[in-house]
Amino acid sequence: MSNRRKSFLIWGATIFLALILLPALTLFSYQKAYAGKIYKNVHFADVDLSGRTKTQAQYLVQSKLRGFTGKDLALSANGKEVKVKLEDTGISFDPAKIIESSYSIGRNNSFISNLTTSTKTIFNDQKISATPYLDQTKYNQFLQIAIGQLNIAPEDAAISIDNGNVKLNNSSNGSNVITDNLADEIISLSGNASDSKIELATLDVPPKVKNADFQTATDEANALLSKKITFAYTDKSYSPSRVAIGAWIEFYSDQNVYHARLNDSNVKAYFNLIAKNFEVTKKDTRVDASGAVLSAGVQGVYLNKDKTLADLKAGLPSPVITIAMTVTTTDPGTVTVLPDNGNAVAGRFPGKYIDVDLKTQTLCRFDGATAIDCFPVSTGKPSTPTPTGTFSIFLKDPKSWSHASSLWMPWYEEWGDGGYGIHELPVWPNGYQEGADHLGTPVSHGCIRLGVGPAETVYNWTDIGTPVFIHN
């Protein structure tokens, strides 16, 4: 081989090696410069992540994602608009996945593949996209709250009587938003940082009750309102106006057909009004304990409302109805009237009872209207008075000890809360018994003291539950 040819081959090999080694060295330097960093020309949306570490990129990516999820989303339908934040629809992103995808470009593959991929980043942009996630539970809540505001509920027809005329409130269709593809539309807008609007399609919702459903009820109500009705009693007559008849009418549904009919209670309320002109309230004869008449009784006269109502319903097929009203009578009873105070009165209770007159300091026994006997007593002094009113004996003890006064109370009968009772003159622990000289004078602490003998008599005569009437 000539020297010339040999020299040519050496220079060619040198050039060839230089062409290989120089790019390789440059690429090696590039990879070393970006060790632990995202390669050049890697972008997420309009954010340049070139030369950023994962930690640095995380701040930029999260900031960008907040711009996505925090933007307003305007939803409109039925002439109404609702604004929500995108994040409130259940849309979210995974920033860690975006950062990992950005950092993995030129890495995590075979050596040759990494060389090729990393080389591309020098000359070409590498776009990283974010995959949104939909939280179905949160999305359903969004539909219920936000989309619910866009729906229009249908209006059912309604019927009523107003001032004697049938009034019909018209029905109207509602409109519900169609949300079948709404999730996909929201996802498609999630990568757009600017505000977004979605116009939603709607579906008409018919009312459950329409005007035509009340045709039968309207005809029946008008027929009732047109009736000429007269109620007569003795020389009096009463004709309800169209407005009054309207107050009697009620509407009801029977097997999905609406009807009009009379409401019994409302009709009887009208009867109560007209009956005030002739009804008489029964008053009992009032007598005192001796049977003497204090005030004469009055017979009660009352409209027979049930029969009058039945007669009215029986006459409804006729356009003109005349009803002769009937009444029922109630004879007066006899009521014995006893004074609440004053002297003892026989017959206050049907069986045996005790009457205590604080004014006269007297206790009397009665069996119905029969007076048995009376005894002098000593009741409570002014500073500790004996209570007045109607009581009954609920405890009996032939010898009761008073802890408050430290003395014995023979033939004790308790009749009032707080330790009030009827008993014999008290006995001290040493056997000394109070004298009878203070009987007839109020000196006790509220109990009713009887003398020796009468206390035992009363004790043996009474039962648990025997009434005790105490008065001034």
Image (cartoon, rainbow, N blue to C red):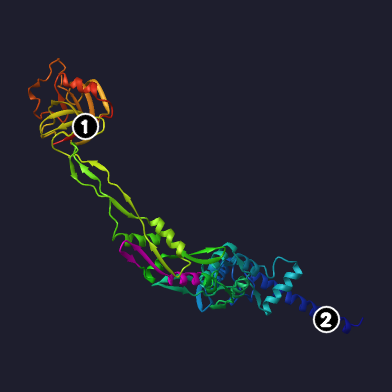
Q: Which residue is mark 2?
A: 12
Find residue 42 and report its horizontal and vertical position in percent: 64, 74
Furthest-top residue in this view? 431
Specify the amino acid type for callout 1: Ala
| Magenta span contains residue 269 | no
Dot 2 or dot 1, earlier in sequence: 2
Q: What residue is pinned by disc 1?
A: 369
Q: Residues within 10 Å of mark 2 (few under 14, many from 20)?
A: few
Q: What kind of residue is marked 2?
A: Gly
Q: Position of residue 250 (x, y in %)?
A: 45, 65
Answer yes or no: is residue 59 visible.
no
User: Residue 391's x, y, as percent?
Assistant: 23, 34
Q: Is residue 366 left or right of residue 381?
A: right
**In screen coordinates, is 6 left or right of 159?**
right
Residue 174 sits above or below residue 330 on the image: below
Reply above or below: 384 against 19.
above
Element type where label 2 sits in the image: helix
Q: How many numbered badges does the structure rendering display?
A: 2
Q: Please give the name of the residue rendered at 49% of the width and 69% of the height, measured from the top-left corner.
A: 220
Name the one closer to the observer, 380 or 34.
380
Residue that sits furthest to the right in the current view: 1
Residue 182, given in percent of the width and then of the height, sits at 60, 72
**446 to 57, vertically: above or below:** above
Residue 400 in view of the camera? yes
Q: Residue furthest bottom?
A: 4
Pick the front one: 55 or 151:
151
Residue 370 vs 47, above or below: the answer is above
Q: Count residues near mark 1 (Cα–Cα under 10 Å), then give few for <14, some for 14-19, many for 20+.
A: some
Magenta segment range?
217-238
